[in-house]
Image: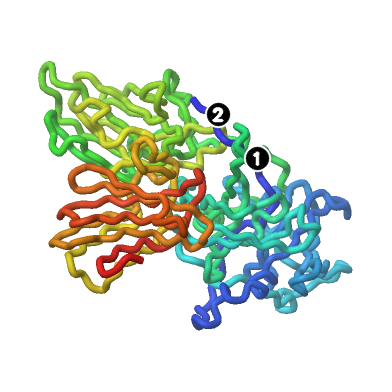
Amino acid sequence: MRKTPGIVAVSVAAALSVHCQAPPEPAERAGSDIDRISRSVVRVVALQGGEEVASGSGTVINSSGLIYTNRHVVEDADDYAIEILEDANELPVFRYLGRLVGFSIDVDFAVLQIDRDTQGQRVLAREVDLPSPALRAEEGRRGDEVRVLGYPGIGDGYLSVTEGIVTTVRNVTLHGQRLQGWYQTDAEIAPGSSGGLAVNADGEMLGIPTAIRMDEEGTGGRLGLILTLDAVHAAIESGLETGVPRTVETPATRAIPGGELDFDKDPTYGSVTLFAGFEPDPHTIPDVISGGEVAVDYLGGDCVAYAAVEPDFRLNWGGSVPAGPPLSIVFIPEYVEHDATLLVSLPDGSWVCNDDANEDTFAPMVTLHDPAEGQYDIWVGNFGAAGEWALGERGTLFFTEQDFSAVGAGPGELDPMLDPYYGSVSLRAGFRPDPNISRIVGGGPVDATYLGGDCRGHAAQAPDVRLDWSGASDVLHVTFFADNGVHDATLVVKRPDGSWICNDDADETTLDPMVTLSQPAQGQYDIWVGSFERGLAISGDLVLMEDAEP
């Protein structure tokens, strides 16, 4: 079991249900006016007996002064000073006092309401008239642009804006709902600024920056976590607590109890009936998200980590043949460094669990010899520090009677069996329009140098784009143009005959890669865009063209 990164809670504004307004015209989108968006982000100073005990950021949700912030910002306080940004280049100004409306125990979230002026005189909601953020965004996706606004302690009290992308979307189970719970981002989040406001490129509210994850192994890696509005809404719908919130353990140390695994509930990702000798083998279930709120060590034995209450998948097994091969259940995470676990409830009610299939992998595997006919309920757990249960990872669940090594790519390898992130394109020689362009974000955890030759860089396990090619052509160019000219991208292409062709730089004048396919054979080409630097996500255009070299 690996040592997992720590999670540190930081002062931020957090969420409730966003009061949406009519969409503005495209030319007036909030993303084009960051100063206007900034005015909806306030500095919250928590007071106890008139003395400051903590500070953080908050987001004004409507013009009457309703504010979303993190629970840990308002803990152990009896009053709250609200500082408003009147000039984007000046310090915020103390203008109001607010009361606590309620807070959530399940997620780091609280709600304040401005109700008094600086002298303690009552202020009616209609007298506040503060700006609120633009529309709530649709659900975020990997690669979406992110801006984080807040008041970091290192910023001497001034408003700060940082930029990045959504690097990972993490699903959670809250109050019986499976939903997007966290957006992981490379946008900088610092104590004090987290939670203010996270918006997309159009200025639409994505959620609340809430925590940071730091690599404690000495590499200096650091990623931020944004609490999604879906998670906030689930907390609100379940009812908020009132009274004075007391300091609780942060997500780095606290596990939220979630009861027990329940095989009477419907599985999240469906079910299948298989018999010995099933085809195709392996049977795969893509896009399974590990993790949940239940600490499963109560089952004993090898059962560890956190899983959802309901099963992730259900297998109805039709029975084995005498001396037939064993049935293996394998979960291969999208990111090789993710440490998942498997938990399987057998037809007789007993449990079989696994953490790592062997010492060379974090991928778990349960092997059943002569499995009995009946129902098998399967959970994919997330092995992490207590409280990290919400931070599940995407992967593929396999059922196979083959040897484990025959199941697609092994952990740490590129896997053409997986669905491409940015879809497939079918092109024929002489295609129009030429070039064909796909907007993607490259990079990932797999080091492509294991392929040998010119293959290098770090890419996602699944292909970025799949090309189905037909017809006869003299040449086809595959090129990636990074948005940022200083980012060093690479290309890895698997040809229909199973061979690989790769490139780092198209020539000595550029860091953009290009693969030239002379007289390309008909068939399937799987294309990965990698980053020469590990851990870097590179946005840009993947270009397929015949007519001329870029």
Identify which residue, 439 or 2, lies in the foreground.
439
- Determine which quarter of the picture holds residue 370: top left
Q: As drawn, is 399 to the left or to the right of 146?
A: left
**How are the residues colored?**
rainbow
* Residue 9: image location, x then y, percent: 66, 45
Contact, mark 1 vs mark 2 (Cβ under 8 Å)? no
The secondary structure type at the circle numbered 2 is loop
Residue at x-position 59% and y-position 55%:
187
Q: Residues within 10 Å of mark 1 (few under 14, many from 20)?
A: some
Residue at x-position 66% and y-position 64%:
59
Q: Which residue is mark 2?
A: 3
The amino acid on which the numbered mark 1 sits, given as a three-letter code, is: Thr
The amino acid on which the numbered mark 2 sits, given as a three-letter code, is: Lys
* Residue 238: image location, x then y, percent: 53, 52
Q: Residue furthest top?
A: 323
Identify which residue, 11 or 266, lies in the foreground.
11
Residue at x-position 80% and y-position 61%:
81
The secondary structure type at the circle numbered 1 is loop
Q: Residues within 10 Å of mark 2 (few under 14, many from 20)?
A: few
Sequence-wise first label, 1 or 2: 2
Q: Is residue 195 above or below residue 265?
A: below
Q: As drawn, is 18 to the left or to the right of 191?
A: left
Q: Which residue is mark 1?
A: 250
Q: Is residue 334 above or below residue 318?
A: below
